[in-house]
Image (tube, rainbow, N blue to C red):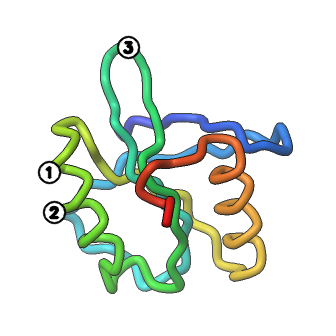
Amino acid sequence: MTRQIDFAGKSGAVYRYAALEEERTLPPVGANYVIAKVTPEGSSILYAGETSNMASRDWRNVLDEAQTQFQQAQVLTRLNVRHAIREAERDDIIQEHSPPLNAG
């Protein structure tokens, strides 16, 4: 069963993300993703991003960087085809959580 985690944005909207199973073939579709530190005590967002093609794995470098600092870091995804909506949701999450890997 895939683990799902809800994250609220600054707007109050709640976005449901699912843990990514990297060994599975990823679809070439647009998605929002977060790199999060997931522990039994809770989850915190380290990075929020969006991609037009999950299969391209353009999120992999950020995940590798996060895992050097946080052992529990993992990628969670939210499929979303429309680019404008992906950007708005990513920005909403960033405004609420101020992920440290989005800084700079």
Return the residue at label 1.
68
First-in-chain label (1 vs 3): 3
Name the residue type under label 2: Glu
Name the residue type under label 3: Glu
User: Disc 2 versus disc 3: distance between alpha carbons?
Assistant: 26 Å
In x, y percent, where is residue 61? Answer: 24, 72
Check residue 23 in the rendering and tell me which mark sits there, or answer none. 2
Q: Residue at x 39, y 43 (%)?
A: 36
Give the quarter of the figure containing the N terminus: top left
How many other residues sit within 10 Å of disc 1, few (<14), some (14-19) or many (≥20)? few
In x, y percent, where is residue 43? Answer: 43, 29
In x, y percent, where is residue 21? Answer: 26, 55
Residue reaching furthest to the front: 104
How many other residues sit within 10 Å of disc 3, few (<14), some (14-19) or many (≥20)? few
Return the residue at label 3.
41
Q: Residue at x 76, y 66 (%)?
A: 88
Under circle 1, the secondary element is helix
Q: Residue at x 85, y 44 (%)?
A: 11
Under circle 3, the secondary element is loop
Viewed as shown, does residue 16 lie left or right of 51? Answer: right
Q: Residue at x 46, y 54 (%)?
A: 34
Viewed as shown, does residue 100 lie left or right of 87? Answer: left
Q: Where 37 falls versus 68 (above or below)? A: above
Name the residue type under label 1: Thr
Viewed as shown, does residue 30 lie left or right of 85? Answer: left
